[in-house]
Image (cartoon, rainbow, N blue to C red):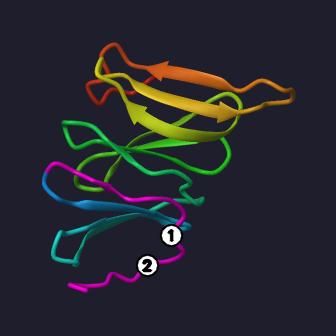
Amino acid sequence: MKWAYEAAYITAGTSIGADGTVYLPTVDGLHAVHPLGTRRWFAGTAQALRDRPAVWGDGTIYVNGDYQDVYAFNADGTLKWLYQVPGTNPAGAAIGPDDRLYLGTGASGGSFSYLYAFGTPLAGSDPR
């Protein structure tokens, strides 16, 4: 083992940015870890982050929280925006070849789930 990084309960898989930064979602926020194992930054959240982060080419990190929240963080860890999607429990943020953010949700008051597409193009913009 080359190194170990200690964090609160890890809730999903990690993602790696173009510069090698490892993004780690936990019950208390998002950790950005240098490839040598030291903390670059930590962005605390009011809820657990539940999915593997999606990292866009400009360094924006998208990650789903509990309930209906989707977070967008700048490459320096500051919050770019927070958006509530209809439905429950956003799942599986991904960035498509068309530079759109795609996001699924669980059912809301019924038996349907939804897939949402944000941005045209995404370009790190606020989806609202």
Graded by Cα atoms within 10 Å as few (under 14), some (14 to 19) or many (20 or more), the crowding at tag 1 reads: some
Instruction: Please count the marks in the image.
Output: 2
Graded by Cα atoms within 10 Å as few (under 14), some (14 to 19) or many (20 or more), the crowding at tag 2 reads: some
The quadrant holding residue 42 is bottom left
For the point 33% across and 81% down, which residue is it? 5
Percent position (x, y) of residue 104? 58, 31
Q: Which residue sits furthest top? A: 120
Looking at the rendered structure, the secondary structure element under dot 1 is loop
What's the magenta region? Answer: 1-18
Percent position (x, y) of residue 117? 48, 20
Assess whether residue 4 is covered by the magenta stretch: yes
Q: Is residue 95 above or below residue 13?
A: above
Disc 1 marks which amino acid? Ile
Residue occupied by mark 2: 7
Looking at the rendered structure, the secondary structure element under dot 2 is loop
Disc 2 marks which amino acid? Ala
Percent position (x, y) of residue 82? 48, 40
How far separated are the C-alphas under marks 1 and 2?
Answer: 7 Å
Q: Which residue sits furthest front? A: 1
For the point 77% across and 32% down, which residue is it? 107
Residue occupied by mark 1: 10
**On the picture, is 84 further left or further right than 79?**
right
Q: Assess whether mark 2 and mark 1 are in contact (beta carbons under 8 angstroms).
A: yes
For the point 56% across and 67% down, which residue is it? 27
Q: Residue 109: which numbered mark, if any?
A: none
Q: Quadrant of the N terminus?
A: bottom left
